[in-house]
Image (spheres, rainbow, N blue to C red):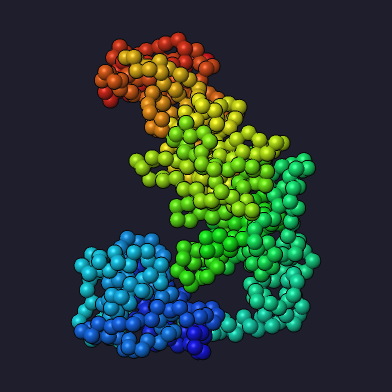
Amino acid sequence: MSEGTLDVEQAELALVEHYGRLVRLAHCVLADTPRKAHALTREALPRRCTSTAALPRPQTRPETRQQPEGAQDEDPAYVWLRLRVLRAALARPGDGAEARAAYALRHLESMADPDIRRLLRAAHVRDPDAALAQARTGPADRPPPDSPGSPGSPDSPEMPCVLCGTREPHPLEVVRRRRRRRVVGTAVLAALVCGGMLGVPGDTWGPDAAARPPLVRGTDGERALDPDALVRVPPGTWRRASRVDFAAWPARGSLTRDESLLRRALVTWARPRADVRVSAAPGTPEGPPPGPPQLLYAGRLEGAAVVLLYDGLRVARYAEPLDPDDGSAAAKDGVSLELSRTAGAQTAASGALTVTRKEGEVRYLTAPWIRRAAEVDLLDPADVAGRELSRGEDGVTGPVPLPVTQPHHCESWPGLALTGSPGAASAAQLYTDLGELTPARLTDGTAREPATGAAARERLARTACHLPAVLDQGVKTVNSWQFARQRLPDGDGEAAWVCTRAGTWRGTGARVMTQFQPPAPPGRPGAVTSRAEDSRACGPRERDVLTGLLWKSTRGHWYVLAAADESVTRLRARGKGLADGPAEVTGNTLAVRAERGASARLSATR
């Protein structure tokens, strides 16, 4: 192993020598079955040479503790494997994992607090001091290590008894299998190359040649991996295009000519590696593009290289860290591919794409026809103009806060206001981030106009805090429609009855809710009276609505309230707790005195 470089063979030898220590560490952090600790340790082996220059090497050692063999001058290969095991174990969900990691490093690895802090930071633990503080009292689910020399203690050659009973392959056998696979893989690759069957675009050799999957020459699938075949729309095309949508976006960003990056993005879309984090909005196909996609963006943002591609049906977002070892959020995220369906997108739905979403903030890439972008608070109907967002020459906005989706913490809800140029979405449009690559468009009324009018903003301000119910559902638009107004008993003013429909890009799986919105300060959520999923209700084809609730007036009286759409001519209420028994009224709203805890069955006549 050359200085600063870790060979695969050297890592394999270190795994065999220190297998027990690594498995013990993984098991203590995971607090799970021994089988998972073994599997995680085996997966820590590298697939190719890697650098060890930035490894967090121990600098101090507690003199009063017995140390593992070799602790004074630890093998860089073991240090690298330990970091890999620690990162992988901490990446798995589990309460108290960071404290267990600090506890294990102190008692099993005999590390001093400064070294533990340095190693935890390298393993992407955000608050090493908090982990150390909790570890000092001992995690509740991790008993202290046995005395020196007993099974499970740092210097014991044996494995803890809880790990010994598992039927796992010996580390030597693991290494032998890996080496056999490498030999077989090399032989197969040589046969393919000699037979002329390894078809790739451009040159056969290069720094990323190993990432290219085998294809048959001359096919659309082959051309889809060729950066030179990417569709690049000239700037200004949208001004003369008959269809103004994503297909009219030019290629923007500082890396649009980085052939190596673009090839990695294309290959990942076609055939992602096992270590690539792939996600797709519900109903979005995950297969490769049918031919060369269109390049929308390639640039550097938030410590990552980001590429946006469009194949007419979907938008793909590829991201890779600029420095995989710098400990940044981008490095922790690794390589990712996100897919989102955009079939049938028109001008208003093509106003922006999410280009990064990190650390509670989101940045958008705006359409080339957008002349103004602003952040607004959807809970404040008076916030019309908002705060204008800065945009670079590539069309990327400044950061916009992500909504806080925790219950009872809805104090603001950031929205995106976009104003287009004459001839292309010149009217202002409202959007918000619901976890997709495309921000959801916010509309109002049966005509689904932009939710920018005064009455629409009032309804939206009472609705926004209910939007966490439709996060990550592939939502395209959220439309609110007032289907009734009702004068409340006991002089409590007038209430609005609103139906909200979150429609999806795939056309199915829409989520619907009805709300009762009595007089209240702006931003106070309305009361949800009913919900439906995968329903046509409140849509363009189905506007029949009937709903109700038990309500208490400011005078302390209880009422059963109900409302229906305007086509209803009579309403009836039957059930337990109605003060005067069954009730029937003319019109599409009803208010009946009731007891606390009353339940009623509603029906209507059209």
Q: Residue at x 44, y 34 (%)?
A: 380
Residue 278 spot, x, y in % from top left: 55, 60
- 286, above or below 448, in the image: below
Q: Residue at x 58, y 82 (%)?
A: 182
Q: Quadrant of residue 136?
A: bottom left
Q: Is residue 473 left or right of residue 135?
A: right
Residue 60 spot, x, y in % from top left: 30, 82
Q: Quadrant of residue 123?
A: bottom left
Q: Residue at x 66, y 80 (%)?
A: 188
Q: Is residue 238 left or right of residue 364?
A: right
The residue lying toward the viewer, choosing from 486 and 543, is 486
Residue 484 spot, x, y in % from top left: 48, 20
Residue lying at the far top in this picture: please name it. 586
Q: Quadrant of residue 146?
A: bottom left
The residue lying toward the viewer, choosing from 315 and 289, is 315
Is residue 277 visible to us here?
Answer: no
Q: Residue at x 73, y 76 (%)?
A: 204
Q: Is residue 173 left or right of residue 292?
A: left
Count numbered badges in the picture. Answer: 0
Residue 312 spot, x, y in % from top left: 70, 50
- 20, above or below 284, in the image: below
Is residue 243 visible to us here?
Answer: yes
